[in-house]
Image (tube, rainbow, N blue to C red):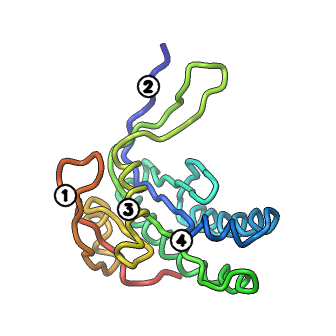
């Protein structure tokens, strides 16, 4: 039997294009491909710049992991600055696509820090490397909550605690989220990054 993987301390960044279902109903298939490529390139450029790695891509969703063992204490800070950089660059995509879309492009981002399991799943010849753990689902749920809080970035208390000395944050509230028995404090950064 294969080993289940390796536990690592990491910061997860989950990014998704807001209103993607609306966008694919406006753009042609070729335009949608170009649009998604523009968004993915913006997100990946920021990830590379700040030490993130691509975990997976699913259409309008990209999951990044910041898990440098030599910079474990800095991983949350790097994820937050990456998210702020993505938000600063997304305006360029809105400008490029304003001829076809009559609304601003928004990327919702959820960030969570904690222990995850990384490794292969499936026992067949074709295995897939993946991330597993409550912080993976928490980052996803935080991104989904962005619209409810009228923000573009939400992060959990664990990330906040490790990044609070580098950024200004506002506590957006606390929520009981699916799969969690205690309420999760959620924060949003109030500063921008170059």
Dot 1 and dot 4 residues touching (CB under 8 Å) = no
In-image side of 144 versus 183 (left or right): right
- Pointer 2: what residue? 4
46 and 126: which is toward the camera: 126
Estimate the spatial distance between the alpha carbons at disc 3 and disc 4, rounded to whole Å: 12 Å
Pointer 1 residue: 183
Mark 3 or 4, nearer chain start: 4
Which quadrant of the structure image shows residue 179?
top left
- 1 and 2 marks in contact (CB < 8 Å): no
Which of pointers 1 and 4 lies earlier in the amino acid sequence? Answer: 4
Figure quadrant of residue 91: bottom right
Q: Secondary structure at mark 1?
A: loop
Image point (48%, 58%), residue name: 14
> On residue 107, which mark appears?
4
State how far apart marks 1 and 4 are (Cα): 25 Å
Seen from the viewer's position, the closer of residues 42 and 35 is 35
Say if 127 sits above or below 129 in the image: above
Circle 3 residue: 142
């Amino acid at each position: 039997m294969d080993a289940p993987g390796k536990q690592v301390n990491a910061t997860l960044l989950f990014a998704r294009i807001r209103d993607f279902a609306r966008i694919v109903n406006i753009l042609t298939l070729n335009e949608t491909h170009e649009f998604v490529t523009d968004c993915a390139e913006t997100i990946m450029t920021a990830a590379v710049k700040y030490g993130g790695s691509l975990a997976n891509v699913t259409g309008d969703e990209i999951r990044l992991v910041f898990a440098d063992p030599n910079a474990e204490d800095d991983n949350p800070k790097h994820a937050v600055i990456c998210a702020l950089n993505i938000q600063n660059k997304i305006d360029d995509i809105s400008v490029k696509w304003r001829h076809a879309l009559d609304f601003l492009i928004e990327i919702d981002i959820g960030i969570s820090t904690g222990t995850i399991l990384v490794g292969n799943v499936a026992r067949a010849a074709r295995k897939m490397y993946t991330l597993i753990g409550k912080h993976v689902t928490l980052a996803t749920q935080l991104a989904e909550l962005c619209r409810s809080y009228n923000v573009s970035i939400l992060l959990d208390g664990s990330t906040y605690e490790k990044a609070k000395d580098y950024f200004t944050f506002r506590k957006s509230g606390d929520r009981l989220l699916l799969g969690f028995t205690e309420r999760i404090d959620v924060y949003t950064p109030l500063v921008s990054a170059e």
